[in-house]
Amino acid sequence: MITAIGFASVYIARKSEVSLASVLYAAFFFALFVAAHLVVRWTLPQADPYLLPIAGLLAAIGLTEIYRLGPKDAFRQGLWVVIAVAVFALALLAFRRDYRVLENYKYIFGLVAVALLFLPKVPGLGTTVNGARLWVHIGPLQFQPGELGKIALIVFLAGYLREKREVLAQGRLKDWGPLLVIWGASMLVLAATNDLGSGLLYYGIFLGMLYVATARTAFVAGFLGLFLVGAIGIYKVTPHVRERVTIWLHPWTEHKVYCPLTNSMALRQDCQSYQLVRSLYSMAHGGYGGTGLGKGTVTNTDGSPLIPFLKTDFIYSALAQELGLIGAAALLLVYMVFVLRGFRTALFASDGFSKLLAAGLTFGFALQTFIIVGGILRIIPVTGITLPLVSYGGSSVVANFLVLAGLMLVSNRANRERAL
């Protein structure tokens, strides 16, 4: 119903007429998730009943707003949602008996994670978008390998920390070696991709899982200190990271500064911080109740986008303008309920690997949401990652449905063991 109302509102705002197209979109979306629900009931009858509907709602909100911004993009995003649901179903079918076999291949997952994180640096494959080198371009296909690398990293950490969490407390260097490698890899990713958000996301997942495994705040504080030292070092030697921090702290200037985009002098809000400042104005324009779906201002008078990369990095600002503070807060509450159910699954899991896997997947989902929304709201520097399940992008949608599959696999096992 929400999807149908959303598509109808956008269609009326765009075409000034009522059409059955919005109902057809909603009907297809409904049928897709009914099929996914039937697969869940057959493979994982005791899985958490709230996770799939919440994911469907978030995907519907994203698809509706993407349709509002560009119908052609919405069609492509719809295809990716179908592919993501199919991958989700295949993951449930493949691991419904015992997903814990993944722990046997933890070191392979660790190597795969590192390889995926550095894949954008391969000459001829990596592509720089908005200053950050996070994308890989193969023929007509463009994707972010870091999205899948994030999941591989979580599987590795879940297996390694489950095995070593007791000996880690003894402080032997050989046991801390792989974890120090993760710190080094995070710093290299930060330097190689020119993106503070990616390094923060991967390292934040590591710190969150380390705390779950050891319950030692001293370890987390120590590794957080290492990250800050490394981040400061990268800040001093990487102009792009330094520029992102400057934009975050001082998005407006009263005097003209050097603009690298035009190789001339200009106000910062008309150059480097143009995207962030226009995003802040967009959200302010929405007020409490919003302008209404399809009625927001998203283009200039010449038809060009008002905010660059609006459908990917800054889709939250479009939603905040058209849904207002109330709608944007409601969206964040939906994310919070998903995170609540994920951590509930981790608490009920009986074995260490399942507990760490569920906690890592949930924390990664939550941290990614905070990083992108925090950047748009100017709480932290702006990053190039996507809003889970809402932003435009195939690799992000597929990766987050794999996160959903992992949480449902763990919750089914946990609920079944509690019922015995």
Image (spheres, grey):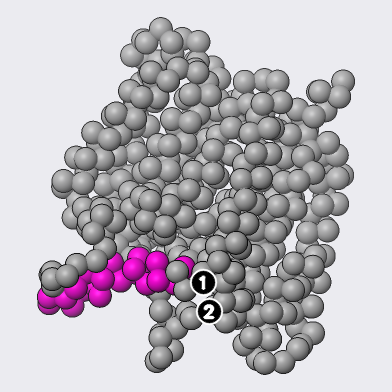
In the rendered structure, which amino acid carries the disc numbered 2?
Gly
Q: Is residue 244 above or below residue 211?
A: below
Report x, y in % for residue 347: 67, 26
Q: Are marks 2 and 1 in contact (CB under 8 Å)?
A: yes
Q: Is residue 351 left or right of residue 70?
A: right
Q: Is residue 319 visible?
A: no
Residue located at (28% from left, 29% from top): 226
For the N terminus, the image quarter is bottom right
Callout 1 environment at 10 Å: few (<14), some (14 to 19), or many (20+)? many
Q: Which quadrant of the figure has residue 202?
A: top left
Q: Secondary structure at mark 1?
A: helix
**Horizontal and vertical percent for residue 180?**
34, 26
Q: Which residue is mark 2?
A: 296
Instruction: Name the residue type under label 1.
Output: Gly
SS type, badge 2: loop
User: Going 65% across and 61% down the picture, which residue do you hit?
Assistant: 59
**Residue 317 in view:** yes
Q: Position of residue 99 (x, y in %)?
A: 69, 32
Task: Report which residue position mark 1 lands on.
Answer: 286
Residue 211: x and y in percent read: 48, 24
Please name whichever residue, 356 or 141, is drawn nearer the observer in this view of the structure: 356
Image point 39% across, 92% down: which residue?
302
The one nearer the camera, 156 or 333, is: 333
**Residue 351 within the magenta-colored segment of the rendering:** no
The residue under the point 55% across, 45% down is 365
Residue segment shown in magenta: 261-283
**Which is nearer the N-term, disc 2 or disc 1?**
1
Verify whether residue 269 appears in magenta: yes
